[in-house]
Amino acid sequence: MLGHRDLTIEDYAGIVKRRMWLIVVSTVCCLAVGLGLTFVLPPKFESQTLVLIQQQKVPEDYVKPLVDEDLGARLASMKEQILSRSRLEPIINENKLFASSANMDERVDLTRKAIKITQIHSEQAHGSGGMPGFFVAFDAQDAHTAQQVCSEITSLFMTENLNARQQSAQGTSDFLKQQLDDAKAKLDDQDAKLAAFEQKYLGRLPGQEASNSNTLQVLTTQLDASTQGLNRLQQNETFLEAMVSQQDQQNQSAEPTVTAIADERQKELKTLTDQETALEATYTPDHPDVVAMKRRIADLKSEIAHAPAAAAHSGDSPAANHPDSPQLVQLKAQLRAAQGSIVNARQEQARIQQQIHGYESRMEASPVVEEQYKLITRDHDTALQFYNSLLAKMNESSMATALENVQKGEQFALMDAANLPDEPTFPNRLMFAGGGLAGGLFLGILLAALLEYRDTSLRNERDVWAFTKLPTMGIISHIEGLPKPDKPHHRRWKWFTRTHKAIESAGD
């Protein structure tokens, strides 16, 4: 009937009523099979431990951690290392895991499948990438074996994390130390180049232009003063030469009378007095030329004062060879002194001019030197900045390495030790029973639906219309006591019985 027409609630209720035993038997059988499997399948005990992630005990503002990789990635890397054959094989041999498998590769694969790592994510765990911890679980057929292996796997995770952080910190410090040494060598080389350049171009470096300009102005002023002094000395030399020449001419002429000599000295005194007046108008009273002129005037006045006594003593008799007079000797001495001063003044003037030429060449070469200085200082500044940055990173790395060595950094903390399971996690009898019950019920309903689909019995007017498309003339109700037609399997059984009896009769 099923599938030949649309069914109603009454049809479904009739199907359930007719096929109730089939559904019940199927359900009970599957339930029994599910419960039976729980006694046949080998049990599995699961031991579990909780590992929490403790942040470093020193604030990151003081010591920045070197290992800032996401914990999920680090945990995956550690998992690959711990689940390697070299790590698992000693545990397998020690605890005799999966001894029924003779092949070690199969035992290693089974052990890997029995290990479960479950991460615990949290939005508050910022330092560990949102992960405050993780669970480690292991399945085994024996509860004590599961507990022992779970403890060993957890210990491997904690040890591997500690070693990995220490190795990472130490490796970073070693790398930075090597880089720092190389940077220091380059900085020393740049320092040597800069020092040699500054020593070579001392006075022409950038920033010394103002000093050179001021020095050049001072030297120019000194040169002007030296030139003026040299001119005065030359004028004085010319005057002294004239005086000496005049005195020589007077000595070569006939011996003058005392009166003529006195008159000449008076004229000379007047000339010297006029020169003194001119010098005092030009220079200060303590100027060397003024002082020398005053000394000459004083000497000449002394000679004029002593001239009458000397004439009286000599009796005014002319001398055959008259030596140089003291005045002439003094004039010659003054002339030699003036000539020496002129030589010194000219040397000083040449020295100042040489210095001026030197400072002028410095100022002319300053743009070229400045360009070269910029290039060498740029390389030096770059090397210095790189060295300082590496030095700062090296100090941070040293503190972070020390932090890891004293185990004050991020660590795995065992919160719950591996537990000893009281009952197996597999097979779960309640789950198997529920599965068998649901499966049996589904199988019974499926079989009932299939049988109803193949059943072509006509039970009501809707069935007649569905098969014949003809209206019903009348309905005969069910009559009790009438013989029921044999079902196909009953007819086959009766035929088999009659045949068997006929064979027995023929044999007799």
Image (cartoon, rainbow, N blue to C red):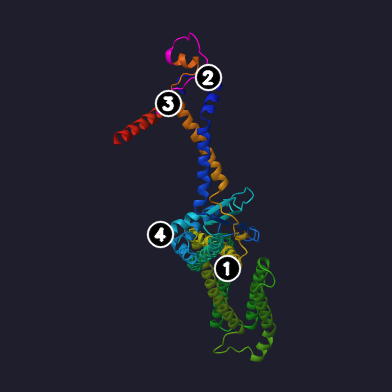
In which quadrant is the C terminus drawn?
top left
- Residue 139 % position (x, y): 52, 56
**Is residue 290 depicted above or below 498 in this figure?**
below
In the depicted view, which residue is nearer to us: 480 or 320?
480
C-alpha span from label 4 to label 2: 74 Å
Numbered label attached to residue 487:
3
In the depicted view, which residue is nearer to us: 357 or 320?
357
- Residue 110 % position (x, y): 45, 56
**Between discs 3 and 1, the one toward the N terminus:** 1
**Residues marked 3 and 2 touching at CB (< 8 Å):** no
C-alpha span from label 4 to label 3: 61 Å
| Disc 1 packing (10 Å; few <14; some 14–19; many ≥20) | some
In the depicted view, which residue is nearer to us: 39 or 288?
39
Q: Is residue 387 visible?
A: no
**Between discs 2 and 1, the one toward the N terminus:** 1
Q: Could you say whether the residue bearing mark 1 is in a helix, strand or loop?
A: helix
Q: Nearer the viewer, mark 4 or mark 2?
A: 2
**Between discs 4 and 1, the one toward the N terminus:** 4
Q: Could you say whether the residue bearing mark 2 is in a helix, strand or loop?
A: loop
- Residue at which label 1 appears: 226
Q: Nearer the viewer, mark 4 or mark 3?
A: 3
Q: Nearer the viewer, mark 2 or mark 1?
A: 2
**Between discs 4 and 3, the one toward the N terminus:** 4
Q: Nearer the viewer, mark 4 or mark 1?
A: 4
The magenta span reads 467-488
Residue 351 lies left or right of residue 413; in this view the side is left
- Residue at which label 4 appears: 105
C-alpha span from label 3 to label 2: 18 Å
Q: Is residue 379 visible?
A: yes
